[in-house]
Image (cartoon, rainbow, N blue to C red):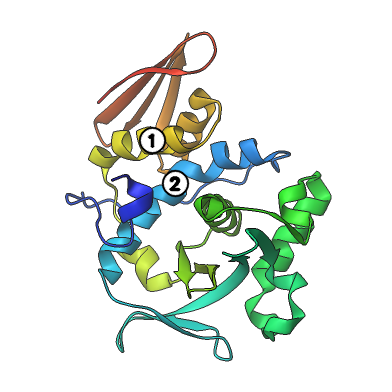
Amino acid sequence: MGLFDKFLGQSGKSKSSDDLQPQPDLTPCKTEQELIERYGGIVLDKQLDFGEYIGTSGWNFNTEKGEISFGPNIVFPMQVLGTISHSSQTWLWAWANPKAGHPESIIQQALNLKKYGEDNGIDLLRLDTFDFTKEELHLMGLIGAGISNSTAYYIADYGRGAMVMTIKSDKLDKLRKENHDRISTVFLQLISQFDMNHKLAFTHYLTAKGYTILEEGNNVTGTRNDKSITGEFDNFSRLSSLTA
């Protein structure tokens, strides 16, 4: 079972005392692949903390309040990105679904993603609906949470379909700690799920976690607080080995 299957229930264990550093401002991405390379690692990393926090609790959401809850004491503000219909296997962005009756306040991130897609020529973000599969929902979650710098994303399956939403919680952001040991696991899972330039994705992931980057030929080494990890890549930027 991979991280994408279990992230809502399990997480990494050991954490050090240093808070994660915010990701620096970067030039806009122009393709879906660039978005995954930019945000995939750090978003999946955040999912582990989120999954540990909510455990195996069931979910309930209130669109009028713009909240999702995992039991009476775990309530977060949410933003709805869109939904997939299991029967038709199509994606529909929240901003293109007036029948859902969502208040405009909870589709602001979806609207922002639309503008990002329009500004940078990314059809995934600017077309209102298209063929999609349940297995691809994590793509929307990773990209949406990455661009919006959300705390996490969540996929709520309601039988006839599934809704992808993002969550922003200052409380959870403050609880997040550096976890050096999980980098290898997260990165290997990421590159097994999506096609991308491994070297760029690794560099972006470490940068987002506040690591100092050193590139030597095909090697990329990230260092933080006397801990380091090195990725060795071939001439096609594919991962050959990871050494921590």
Residue underneath mark 2: 42
Tell me: 127 left or right of 235. Answer: right
The residue that appears at 75% across and 60% down in the rendered structure is: 129
- As shown in the figure, which amino acid type bears the numbered disc 2? Ile
Residue 137 is situated, as x and y percent measured from the top left of the image, at 54, 55
Q: Quadrant of the N terminus?
A: top left
Q: Is residue 20 above or below residue 8?
A: above
Crowd class of label 1 (few under 14; some 14 to 19; many from 20; radius 10 Å)? many
Secondary structure at badge 1 equals helix
The residue that appears at 29% across and 54% down in the rendered structure is: 177
Q: Is residue 146 above or below residue 157?
A: above
Q: Nearer the viewer, residue 159 or 74?
A: 159
Q: Quadrant of the C terminus?
A: top left
Tell me: 46 left or right of 22. Answer: left
The residue that appears at 53% across and 68% down in the rendered structure is: 162
Task: Tell me the tag on residue 187.
Answer: 1
